[in-house]
Image (spheres, helix red, strand yellow):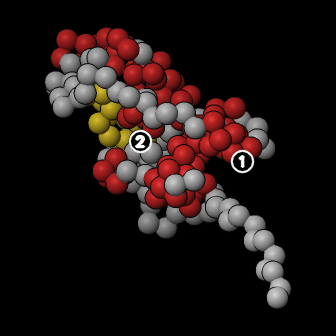
Amino acid sequence: MTIAPRSRPKTFALADLMAKAMDPVLAKQGFGAADLVLNWDEIVGERLARVCEPIKLQWPARPPKAEPGFALEPASLIVRVESGFAVELQHIGGTLIERVNTHLGWRCVGKLLLRQGPVGKGKKATRVKPAADPVARRQAEAETAAIADDGLRDALIRLGERVIAEKRAKDGS
């Protein structure tokens, strides 16, 4: 009787796992991941989060025959803002764009578009963060250790941690 050698655990590219974890509703609104929406209050601060919320990331049209090396222009972030705070948000728009891009780890947003209207419709009073999974965090940190850019590495660690934790929860391990 021969014993089969132990197979190595399957490894997946982070990009392959991301598609499964991405919320289809947010994807229709241009968001590649729920991170921007879920962490909005941390990105802009509690005071601004009470008066504005992200609605959509609007990407520029891509030419039908994009040449190799074609650089996609950054997206426009459409934000709903309470009427009384639109002027204030317009004045600090550059800072808000910088905070969003820093959080995402790359120059994703280039322009801020404001839409006035009520904010917080259907919002829960408090948002409960998922429990931290230290094993998923360590695994995501190990996978991204070779990435030199701190912002990109941090964004990928957050994404990887969430994907790995969801996969572990689903598999029951």
- The picture places residue 132, in percent across and down from the top left corner, at 54, 33
Displayed quadrant of residue 124: top left
On screen, residue 35 versus residue 103, left or right, reads: left
Residues under labels 2 and 1: Cα distance?
21 Å
- The picture places residue 152, in percent across and down from the top left corner, at 64, 38
Instruction: Work out which quarter of the rendered image holds the N terminus and state it.
Output: bottom right
- The picture places residue 33, in percent across and down from the top left corner, at 45, 45
Q: Residues within 10 Å of mark 2 (few under 14, many from 20)?
A: some
Three-letter code, disc 1: Glu
In the image, farthest residue toward the front: 1
On screen, residue 56 versus residue 20, left or right, reads: left
Which mark, residue 34?
2
On screen, residue 142 versus residue 114, left or right, reads: right
Three-letter code, disc 2: Ala
On screen, residue 99 versus residue 58, left or right, reads: right
The numbered mark, 2 or 1, whose residue comes first in the sequence reads: 2
Q: Is residue 104 above or below residue 171?
A: above
Which mark, residue 158?
none
Q: Is residue 28 visible?
A: yes
Q: Which residue occupies the foreground of this view, 64 or 122? A: 122
Q: Is residue 157 above or below residue 98?
A: below
Which mark, residue 143?
1
- The picture places residue 121, in percent across and down from the top left corner, at 17, 29
